[in-house]
Amino acid sequence: MGSTDARAGARSGTGPDRKPGPGRDRAPEEPGPGPEPKEATDTAGTTGTTGTTGTAGTTGTTGTTGTAGTTGTKASGGADDLAGLEAGLDALDTVESRRTPLRETLVRKVLPPVVAVALVLAVWQVLVWAEVTDAYKLPAPSAVWDSLSEMWLQGTLFGVMWTSVSRALLGFVLALAIGTPLGLLVARVKVVRAAIGPVLSGLQSLPSVAWVPPAVLWLGLNDRMMFAVILLGAVPSIANGLVAGVDQVPPLFLRAGRTLGATGLRGAWHIVMPAALPGYLAGLKQGWAFSWRSLMAAEIIASSPELGLGLGQLLDNGRSNADMPGIFLAILLILLVGIAVDLLVFSPLERAVLRRRGLLGRG
């Protein structure tokens, strides 16, 4: 009986004499009747394990090594490209900063206007020598210089200039205080823009001299009349300049400001005005030009001893006295004041704005 159980266990693979094999973990689909299926199963298991392990090991190692090398090369190349891109952006953002030598400044900024003035004086003197017209119509430069020297010796030169300059500056400040909020209101409120936007454009194109007669009738011959003419000439220019600057502000700036809580007056002060500064500055420059022109027109037409002697009155006095050297002197002084204000006030402001935006080198 025992021998019968032993032989049965040997055939089924569960007996004590059965040795474990590599392919023993999977049961055969159909048990064989003798030792031949055992040998086939052991051989198949060993071969499958060895072949699978060896191939998988070799393939896995080789594949991992190749992938790692390729990934490392690509990562190194990507880092180099990123570094090159950052260097290029830094080079674009970098503004060359150097102090301009004094000699270069003199050659580039001082010498050209001096040469231009010298050429004008030379042509003027040649025309006088050629006697292209009567002497009382075209005085010599020396005659104008004599008139300037006479006013200098009398001590009236700076007084006449300051009378006009002080009026123009005060009128321009008043125009600035009125034109700036008016421009913001027109730029930000559609109803107001539709209502008075065309009116501002029309007032800007209206000659300033047209306001002198009604201003004299309304206010009389006094400084209030002068300031009224200045305001009517300068306020539309300042307001339209600010409107043009606000229209050029990117909408993204406004949305970012609203996201950060900058709305109302805070948004206008911190977002709109800095972004619209170039257009606003152009409007200020044009507003000053209109202020100066309006004042000269008012002083020429509405001259009175109570108003004092300004450059406009000086020009009108030269016309009344047929004093051509005095007329040429008044014209040159008016031109000199306009150039001085532009060079000393507006040109530095324009350079500062452009420099802050990276559009102008610090040299």
Image (cartoon, grey):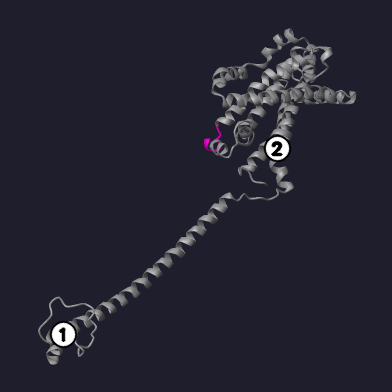
Residue at the far left: name it. Answer: 33
Residue at the far front: name it. Answer: 1
Q: Nearer the viewer, residue 215 or 120?
A: 215
Visible in this render: residue 133? no
Residue at which label 2 appears: 348
Q: Is residue 34 left or right of residue 319?
A: left
Residue at the far top: name it. Answer: 217
Q: Is residue 317 left or right of residue 18?
A: right
Visible in this render: residue 333? yes
Provide the secondary structure element on which disc 1 rests: helix
Task: Tell me the quadrant of the picture where the N terminus can be found.
Answer: bottom left
Quadrant housing residue 347: top right
Image spot of residue 53 (x, y percent): 28, 78
Residue depth check, mark 2 versus mark 1: number of the one nearer the observer: 1
Q: Residue at x 54, y 56 (%)?
A: 87
Circle number at residue 85: none
Residue at which label 1 appears: 38
Q: Residue at x 55, y 33 (%)?
A: 248
Image spot of residue 285 (x, y percent): 67, 29
Above or below residue 190? Residue 94 is: below
Image spot of residue 355 (x, y percent): 64, 43
Q: Residue at x 75, y 10 (%)?
A: 219
